[in-house]
Amino acid sequence: MHIRLFHKTNSRSQRILWLLEELNLDYELIHCDGSIPTQAVEKLANQDSSLKFPTLHLVDDHSTEVISLTETAAIADYLSHQFNDLGIAQLSPSEVLEYYFWKNFAEATFMPDMALKQIFAQIVERTSFPVRFITQLLKFGFDRGYLNHALNQHLYRIDAHLKNHDYVAGEHFSIADILLWFPLLACTQSNTKFASFQHIQRYLRQIQNRPAFQRALEKGQWSAVQFQSYWSKAW
């Protein structure tokens, strides 16, 4: 089976690129920054050219059929199921519970709150100057009324959990760590006060030192400077 990943730099698709490296799989990487390149359109054939990132194509070696899969968590689950690695097989019963919680927490709770933070910041930035104060007041009210408290609570909870765990599911690195990494890094880099969460900082250093992570950064053309600049605007 041929694997093809459509990737956008500094986006959430970096996690699937990392997973492919952790699984040591052969794959074709197509960068889709800005407009979709000609080679990407050709690969899409008769499929919808309005790509989401990440999009994974699976091409059967014995046919022309292309299976297209989107949504980071869905892709991660599928790859884990197919290749029986980095999922629940390596975990104890108690760790399985942690695995399912943190994997879904990352995508269903943490990432949506970070996305809202960025959406409100973008609305303010794109509002014309004479009426910008209106969207600034809207952002201020939503931040004070919900988002800032929610994100602080997320970090306190994660930091307290990591005090007694090497990884979020327990003693073993898993897909839950890969999925949590992006919103956690975005949040900690968006506000300097979050550097005080020492267990989170230890955890990030630990998982980011993995060889597969470093390979994925290079292949994905990751820019730490651009990433921090983008998310810091959310505050």
Image: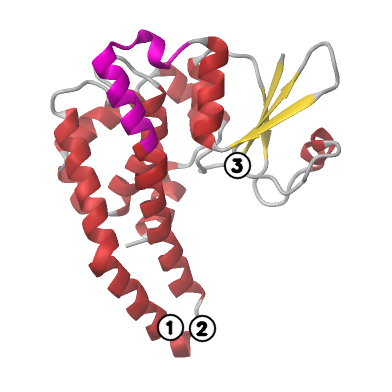
- Residue type at numbered disc 3: Phe
Residue drawn where x is 38% and y is 52% of the image: 114
Q: Quadrant of residue 99?
A: top left
* Magenta portion: prevailing SS class: helix
Determine crowd level at label 1: few under 14, some 14-19, many 20+ residues with C-alpha closer than 10 A.
some
Q: In terms of secondary structure, where does tag 2 sit?
A: loop
Q: Is residue 171 visible?
A: no
Which region shows up in magenta?
Answer: 85-104
The disc at residue 53 is: 3
Amino acid type, mark 2:
Ser
Residue 75 seen anywhere in this rendered image of the structure: yes
Q: Secondary structure at mark 1?
A: helix
The x and y percentages for residue 171 are 25, 14
- Position of the C terminus, as image quadrant, is bottom left
Q: Which residue is mark 2?
A: 128
C-alpha distance separating marks 3 and 2: 30 Å
Task: Establish if 140 lies above or below 156.
Answer: below
Q: Is residue 164 magenta?
A: no
Q: What amino acid type is highlighted by mark number 1? A: Arg
The residues bearing labels 2 and 1 have C-alpha atoms spaced at a distance of 6 Å
- The residue wearing badge 1 is 132
The numbered mark at residue 159 is: none
Q: From the top left corner, tell me how far across and down residue 161 is, in percent.
A: 18, 31
Contact between marks 2 and 1 (CB within 8 A): the answer is: yes
CB contact under 8 Å: marks 3 and 1: no
Residue drawn at 59 percent across, 37 percent down? 54
Q: Residue at x 36, y 53 (%)?
A: 113
User: Tag 3's secondary structure?
Assistant: loop
Give the mark, 3 or 1, whose residue is nearer the N terminus.
Answer: 3
